[in-house]
Image: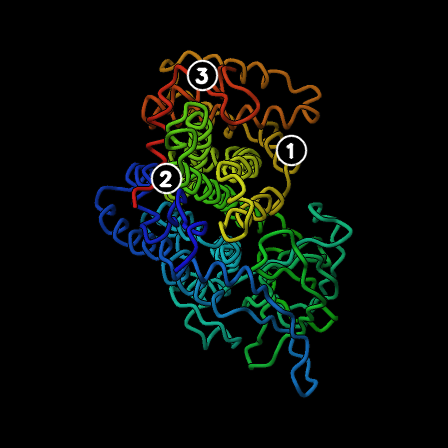
Amino acid sequence: MAPRSHTVTNQAPPLVGYDVFTTDRVLTEAVDRHLPPDLRAEVREDLVVLGRAAGSAQVREWGERADAHPPRLRTHDRYGHRIDEVAFDPAWHRLLGKAVGAGLTDAWGRPGGHVRRAAGFLVASQPEAGHGCPVSMTHASVPALRAEPELAEVWVPAATSHVYERELRPVAEKPGALLGMAMTEKQGGSDVRANTTEARPLAADGEYVLTGHKWFCSAPMSDAFLVLAQAPAGLTCFLVPRVLADGSRNAFALMRLKDKLGNRSNASAEVEFDGTTWARRVGEEGRGLATIMGTVAATRVDCVLGSAALMRQAVAQAVHHCTYREAFGGPLAEKPLMRNVLADLALESEAATVLGVRLAAAHDAADAEGGEAERERALLRIAVPAAKYWVTKRCTPVVTEALECLGGNGYVEESGMPRLLRESPVNSVWEGSGNVQALDVVRALRTEPAALDALLREVGAARGADHRLDRAIRGLLVELADLDGIEARARRLTERLALVLQGALLVRWAPPEVADAFCAARLGGDGGAAFGTLPHTLDLRALVDRARVEV
């Protein structure tokens, strides 16, 4: 019998064995809102299956294992042959199998495909976020591949398959394939025009060999990679397969794996192309950036969704803990100050989810034809970099505050909160850091009038419903009227644009208490710099109850 001093009391039970999808009111409402009625039952059924898996003890354990046993580089086999492979824990492959099997690489051209896939990505990323990297890049590769019909005929069905197969073989022999990217170089970073990797054309049309070094190659065990290199006519996009059609390995030397702050279950590598690396041109020579922009936009949306997933999981853990943990005579969640903190965190999480799913719905609409599709494409041009800038930057403070709600328990690895915290900055860095996004918003304002028109139309749908939102819209218009010195103001402008967009969406679609709180604290100035500073007159209990997971 254990000594009396070891009796465990006043500890919250683990948040496990629940449906991650159906217990998320914000996400379920967004899915219903943006899907046609005839699709809702089918999509909900699929998301419930994924949600139950994501909340299960088994998948949670897979996530812990994949993070605790990071990938290992194997440059040679036992006999000394160069193999350039990365060995992953079996848990990693199980997580990928679940994600691919749930259709998380299959959105393009599928009815409601982007919304259903966005919701699935939000759900699957909560128990473990690192495996979302190859899932995201495979999904995002489709717009670029479509620029080359012969390639698309082979690779798009493989990329959108619901079958995950880890073995490296020619794509024609595989039921499904994953794609990665190798864009940046050590001397250029986000300035990909400074890339020096050279592409030399071969006799066969569209075929080249590459020479160069890529500083970041994501998911290096993928079946193929989209690569930017300098061809005779300028920067061009290429597809580099790991295995060639005859079954031989392409020259793709893995130099080392990055030792990263977070995202540790996922491998990121430096790769060398030795002058014999075979590549197939994607799109026109010299039009690499234009070819890759659809892919960039899709991965940026996933940065928003990935950050929203981390926020949701962190807030769910914090609310769950404070519901069961007692201090000073009652449950923590019932203490006025803690309730304020939890409500503020829930508000940020809801705003991120609503905006992320709205971007996915815009992708669905943009895939169609007609004037509405044009407007949605224009909206994406400005809303995606603004959302990517703001939501990814809000992720780390949200996770940090949620961790603090658990106190010392949250600082211990077993709680899972440190893993969320280590993961939280990755989306703000991936696919262009804050300055890149802010400057992209400015570029859209200067060169694409339709983008601003689409944005104003979107926020205008909520005008007249809240005086604080109306005032914020007027303030944004004043900022937009003066483009002198705009580069130095780009972050300020992008932040305001994102907040106005979030506010407009919540005023239109969220419960009144949520919209009221957001407009007061985020647009009306009635809130502090730290979480837990919402006006005490708001219905804070309703915000916390809305975020609570009922197990």
Residue at x 40% of width, y 40% of height: 357
Say what amino acid the circle numbered 1 marks: Leu
Residue at x 39% of width, y 14% of height: 537
Left or right: 459, with 211 as reference point:
left
Say what amino acid the circle numbered 3 marks: Pro
SS state under label 1:
helix
* Residue receiving disc 2: 324
SS state under label 3:
loop
* Residue receiving disc 1: 439
Residue 535: which disc? 3
Residue 480: % across, % down: 58, 19
Residue at x 35% of width, y 40% of height: 27
Mark 1 neighbour class, 10 Å CA radius: few under 14, some 14 to 19, many 20 or more: many
Please state which of residues 339 and 250 is positioned toward the viewer in this rendering: 339
Left or right: 42, with 501 as reference point:
left
Residue 366: % across, % down: 41, 41
Closer to viewer: mark 3 or mark 1? 3
Please state which of residues 195 and 347 is positioned toward the viewer in this rendering: 347
In the rendered image, the vertical position of residue 85 relative to residue 416, given as above or below: below
Residue 145: % across, % down: 51, 58
